[in-house]
């Protein structure tokens, strides 16, 4: 595995691969890698000749300075995981390397970015679009892999790809969960033992709501999930919305969509957890 820290080295590594007629897959990450990331790398490994993984905690997508400061950084463990997973090139740049000057681009990402995480984390999706578009320009991958835990992020990246005309395939990959159902996340390590013990109730309520939804309205289903989670002292639902899985727009009737996805964020103590579940896709 080749570890590179500069854009020049990265471009030279992918240029060689491309000139040899090889397909290139990219897995953008912010490090603190876990089984969820590994599943993206595994899929990328299967579908491409060359696997490039970026490990970069992107400051422009953090609207909360404390979250950026405390974001876990585990470079050596990340390299070991990537080496074992068969990654070919890992890109671990500094902030100055990615942003030699401030990125002043303002994306108009439209309705997919105006709901849920959009208003809750102002500037977040603009920062994601900035860094992911830069990575796409540097690597020019054939395919790029993203986890479905950040469900709305995938829709936003698709919109950015459409607007900028990138010729690549966005490959969404299923959520990987702990044995007790909690979605794997780099932020899970920040949960206190007590909060870690209750956090699986998020996925439990989401799963139970699949049955509940068969005989209840969208509004009742939202109340079922929200009430069930909020019943735990340490937990507070920030939002639970059931949306169309393509447009991200909230639905009010099940018949409003052929693809219904429930997207949730929950504060578990001071850790913000995110998850989602698909009710149906026709
Ligand atoms: O999902 C993430 O980890 C980040 O938002 C991404 C896509 C790597 C961009 O920094």
Image (spheres, rainbow, N blue to C red):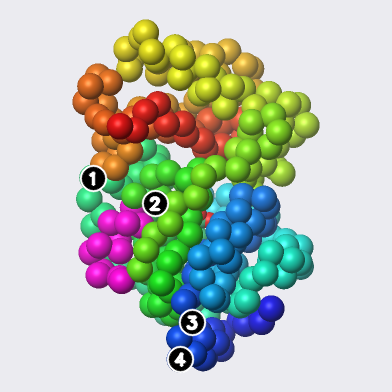
Which of disc 1 and disc 3 is earlier in sequence?
Answer: 3
Q: Is residue 25 above or below residue 261?
A: below
Inter-mark Cα distance, 3 to 1: 36 Å
**Quadrant of image for the N terminus:** bottom right
Within-10-Å neighbours for mark 2: few <14, some 14–19, many 20+: many
> Would you say residue 97 sits in the magenta stretch?
no
In the rendered structure, are the residues bearing label 1 and label 2 in contact, judged by CB atoms less than 8 Å apart? no
The label shown at residue 19 is 4
Which segment did they paint magenta?
156-167
Q: Is residue 47 left or right of residue 39?
A: left
Which of disc 1 and disc 4 is earlier in sequence?
Answer: 4
- Label 1 vs label 2, nearer the camera: 2
Which of disc 4 and disc 2 is earlier in sequence?
Answer: 4
The label shown at residue 154 is 2
Task: Identify residue for label 3.
Answer: 22
Which of disc 3 and disc 2 is earlier in sequence?
Answer: 3
In the rendered structure, are the residues bearing label 3 and label 4 in contact, judged by CB atoms less than 8 Å apart? no
Within-10-Å neighbours for mark 3: few <14, some 14–19, many 20+: some
Q: Is mark 4 within 8 Å of ligand 1?
A: no
Task: Identify residue for label 1.
Answer: 111
Within-10-Å neighbours for mark 1: few <14, some 14–19, many 20+: few
The label shown at residue 146 is none
Q: Secondary structure at mark 2?
A: helix
């Amino acid at each position: 595995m080749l570890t590179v820290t500069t854009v020049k080295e990265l471009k030279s590594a992918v240029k060689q691969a491309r000139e040899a007629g090889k397909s290139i897959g990219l897995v953008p990450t912010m490090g603190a890698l876990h089984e969820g990331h590994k599943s993206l790398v595994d899929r990328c490994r299967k579908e491409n000749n060359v696997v490039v993984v970026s490990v970069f905690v992107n400051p422009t997508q953090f609207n909360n300075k404390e979250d950026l400061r405390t974001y876990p950084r585990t470079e050596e463990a990340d390299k070991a995981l990537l080496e074992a997973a068969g990654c070919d090139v890992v890109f671990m740049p500094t902030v100055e390397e990615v942003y030699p000057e401030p990125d002043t681009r303002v994306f108009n990402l439209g309705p997919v970015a105006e709901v849920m995480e959009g208003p809750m984390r102002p500037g977040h999706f603009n920062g994601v679009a900035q860094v992911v578009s830069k990575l796409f320009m540097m690597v020019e991958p054939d395919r790029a892999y993203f986890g479905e835990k950040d469900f709305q992020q995938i829709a936003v990246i698709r919109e950015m790809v459409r607007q900028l005309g990138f010729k690549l395939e966005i490959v969404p990959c299923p959520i990987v969960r702990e044995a007790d159902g909690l979605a794997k996340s780099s932020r899970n390590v920040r949960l206190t033992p007590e909060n870690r013990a209750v956090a699986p109730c998020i996925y439990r309520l989401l799963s139970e709501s699949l049955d509940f939804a068969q005989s209840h309205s969208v509004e009742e289903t939202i109340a079922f999930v929200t009430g069930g989670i909020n019943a735990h002292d340490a937990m507070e639902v920030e939002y639970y919305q059931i949306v169309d899985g393509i447009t991200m727009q909230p639905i009010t009737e099940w018949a409003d969509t052929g693809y219904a996805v429930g997207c949730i964020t929950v504060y578990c103590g001071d850790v913000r957890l995110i998850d989602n579940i698909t009710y149906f896709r026709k």
